[in-house]
């Protein structure tokens, strides 16, 4: 960082001496030295996850200099701004250059319709971003000002003495960490006026600066270098144009981790998880443009003229919006803030649904879909969109917005969330919501509900058991930290956190307790487990899903040779529906005495134990294994537990 500052400062000093030398040797533009002050009008907080974050506008306000002769060629300067991160302003290629959406505006053109010569002038683009445009000093054609020393904007013409308005907007050329504005007119305002150069629409890769400070915010620094036919003496060439902070806290809450494979689910079964996106500062969530009316999608349309007033704070994903050509617009983002969920490891027989808007919870939707009110809303609101990269477009009509319409209700209640199905490929799918309403004065949380439906088919082991996950981030995701003419804007790094649990499907199981087993002192114990998932009750809804699986015995106690060391667990192997497994303790766990748990990977398991002396000549007894409530589900179907099994123990 120190070496970068020294390098930038050296460039600024070098440019200053070059300019002075030019002026002192009678270079183009008279002997003028303008005294300039730099300022950052607003120092914004940048999202540490963002690759194209907006920096604060830099203004260079100049006074002084020697009045120029009417008709004289105005000297031009090159203004370069170096940043401590890569400049990622959108490239608007012109003649193979890296001309970008970053703009320099002279004398706040277009900022006012009632006062000030410069701010009232039409915004006019210089079409030569690599060299600037030839300009001449002239009187104010409006008659407001009569001397060249007070002309607040240069006048452009192919011949000296003309009075056509000069260009006042210049495109910046991006090169790595810098942006250069070539051929900027340095017409001295003398001591009675002020010349203002505003640098806007500069975006940087904020991810390289995220988490670099113990205070949680890292400064985005800019250093200004000026070169050309005259000099602009700048009092402060280094500025902070933003502070980077991690902006998003995303979680999956209420994830169901005990969905039984043998129990079908429908939308009315309820949400399997809630996805929450919380901003860490009030301006992290933004609409595409500032809403211009209290109508739906007002914050997504680009209805000209919009966001074209220099120096205005918009708190939107777009900045100063200006048409470069009929097909290219500087400063206009492709969409508002988008919140992205990437689902993984979804079983092939599971259908996934998400709420089409943020919800109160998994059972209650928002009271209504609110409309924007200026740039603030009483209700935060986001809608499901068709992709994370599709543009909101420029159309000024309702229906252009790429909204995904609801296809079902999560329940029969009118207040329940409306949902749409997520398209899945090889167990992976994506849902994206765009912010429609946001309040920059408060930290907001947007919550979306996720639902999973499936039909149980345990004979085919469907749906497959396992944990489904979700990654949460802004969208769209990219890894390129360089300026681009094709990548969308804004764009963000993918989720860096570990995948969050969405839901888990578990085997249907039965837990049996055998309170006493012995194979000592001349006794042996016979053990059986019946898989009764095959039964005659197959009428109407009373269809028992046939299941199959193994049972694992875990022993507590010991053997005659190791009284306090229990044997290792043993498995029955697969027990098909309608069959009974049987074994002897003397074969399975020789010389054991104690108790055992049997965990069966199917429902409707029933156990029996028979203890006797060898040959059952003198002593014998039998008991039903106790069916224990499954601690993984906290519930058990009444058809799986008999009165004698549990009530008798």
Image: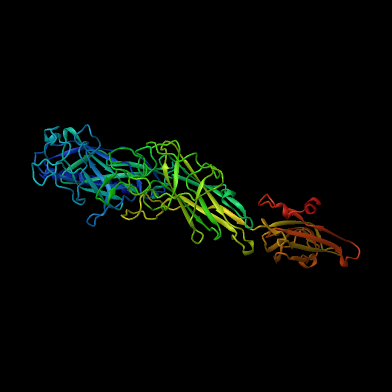
Along the viewing direction, whichever of 372 and 249 lies nearer the viewer: 372
The colour scheme of the drawn protein is: rainbow
Residue extending furthest front?
Answer: 540
Query: Is 456 left, or right, of 118 in this rendering?
Result: right
Query: Is 532 left, or right, of 354 in this rendering?
Result: right
Q: Quadrant of residue 244?
A: top left
Residue 376, given in percent of the width and then of the height, sits at 40, 36
Q: Quadrant of residue 526?
A: bottom right
Q: Is residue 600 visible?
A: yes
Along the viewing direction, whichever of 34 and 649 lies nearer the viewer: 649
Q: How many marks?
A: 0
Residue 170 higher or lower than 601, as above or below: above
Residue 568 higher or lower than 475, as above or below: below
Q: Is residue 87 visible?
A: no
Residue 640, given in percent of the width and then of the height, sits at 72, 55
Query: Is 554 left, or right, of 28 in this rendering?
Result: right
Query: Is 186 left, or right, of 393 in this rendering?
Result: left
Residue drawn at the location 55% of the way across and 59% of the way down: 347
Residue 268, given in percent of the width and then of the height, sits at 58, 49
Residue 375 higher or lower than 53, as above or below: above
Along the viewing direction, whichever of 496 and 273 lies nearer the viewer: 273
Along the viewing direction, whichever of 167 and 636 lies nearer the viewer: 636
Residue 186, given in percent of the width and then of the height, sits at 17, 42
Q: Quadrant of residue 523?
A: bottom right
Residue extending furthest right?
Answer: 618
Residue drawn at the location 66% of the way across and 51% of the way down: 633
């Amino acid at each position: 960082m120190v070496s970068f500052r020294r390098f930038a400062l050296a460039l600024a000093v070098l440019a200053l001496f070059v300019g002075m030398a030019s002026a002192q040797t009678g270079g183009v533009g008279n002997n003028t030295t303008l005294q300039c002050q730099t300022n950052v009008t607003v120092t914004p907080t940048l999202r540490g996850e963002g690759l194209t974050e907006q920096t604060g506008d830099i203004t260079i306000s100049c006074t002084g200099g020697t009045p120029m002769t009417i008709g004289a060629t105005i000297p031009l300067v090159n203004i370069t701004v170096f940043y401590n991160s890569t400049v990622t302003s959108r490239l608007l290629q012109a003649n193979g250059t890296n001309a970008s959406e970053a703009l320099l505006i002279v004398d706040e053109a277009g900022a006012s319709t009632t006062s000030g010569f410069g701010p009232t002038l039409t915004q006019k683009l210089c079409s030569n971003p690599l060299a600037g445009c030839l300009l001449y000093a002239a009187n104010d054609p409006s008659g407001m000002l009569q001397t060249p020393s007070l002309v607040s904007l240069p006048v452009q013409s192919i011949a000296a003495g003309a009075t056509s308005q000069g260009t006042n907007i210049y495109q910046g050329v991006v090169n790595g960490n810098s942006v250069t504005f070539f051929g900027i007119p340095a017409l001295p305002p003398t001591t009675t006026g002020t010349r203002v150069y505003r640098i806007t629409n500069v975006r940087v890769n904020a991810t390289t600066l995220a988490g670099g400070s113990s205070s949680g915010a890292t400064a985005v620094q800019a250093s200004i270098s000026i070169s050309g036919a005259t000099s602009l003496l700048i009092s402060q060439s280094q500025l902070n144009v933003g502070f980077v902070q991690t902006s998003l806290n995303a979680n999956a809450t209420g994830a169901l981790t005990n969905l039984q494979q043998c129990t079908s689910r429908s939308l009315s079964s309820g949400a399997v998880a809630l996805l929450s996106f919380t901003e860490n500062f009030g301006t992290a969530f933004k609409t595409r443009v500032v809403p211009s009316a209290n109508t739906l999608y007002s914050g997504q349309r680009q209805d000209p003229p919009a966001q074209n007033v220099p120096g205005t704070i918009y708190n939107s994903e777009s900045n100063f919006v200006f048409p470069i050509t009929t097909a290219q617009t500087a400063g206009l983002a492709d969409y508002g803030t988008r919140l992205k969920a990437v689902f993984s490891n979804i079983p092939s027989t599971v259908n996934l649904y998400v709420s089409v808007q943020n919800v109160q919870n998994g059972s209650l939707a928002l009271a209504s879909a609110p409309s924007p009110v200026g740039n603030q809303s009483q209700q935060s609101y986001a809608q499901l969109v068709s992709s994370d990269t599709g543009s909101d477009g420029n159309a000024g009509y309702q229906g252009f917005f790429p909204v995904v319409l609801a296809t079902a209700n999560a329940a029969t209640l009118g207040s329940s969330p409306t949902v749409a199905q997520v398209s899945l490929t090889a167990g992976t799918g994506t849902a994206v919501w765009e912010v429609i309403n946001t309040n920059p004065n408060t930290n907001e949380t947007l919550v979306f509900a996720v639902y999973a439906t499936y039909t149980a088919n345990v004979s085919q082991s469907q749906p497959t058991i396992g944990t489904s996950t979700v990654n949460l981030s802004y969208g769209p995701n990219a890894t390129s930290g360089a300026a681009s003419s094709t990548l969308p804007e804004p764009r963000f790094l993918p989720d860096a956190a570990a995948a969050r649990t969405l839901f888990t499907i578990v085997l249907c199981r039965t837990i049996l307790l055998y309170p006493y087993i012995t194979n000592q002192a001349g006794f042996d114990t016979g053990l059986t487990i019946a898989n009764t998932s095959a039964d005659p009750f197959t009428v109407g809804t009373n269809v028992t899903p046939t299941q199959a699986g193994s049972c694992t015995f875990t022993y507590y106690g010991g053997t005659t040779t190791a009284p306090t060391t229990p044997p290792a667990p043993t498995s029955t192997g697969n027990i098909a529906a309608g069959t009974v497994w049987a074994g002897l303790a003397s074969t399975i766990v020789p010389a054991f005495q104690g108790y055992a748990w049997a965990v069966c990977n199917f429902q409707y398991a029933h156990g029996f134990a028979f203890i006797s002396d060898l040959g059952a000549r003198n002593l014998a007894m039998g008991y039903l294994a106790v069916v224990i409530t499954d601690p993984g589900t906290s519930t058990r179907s009444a058809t799986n537990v008999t009165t004698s099994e549990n009530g008798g123990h």
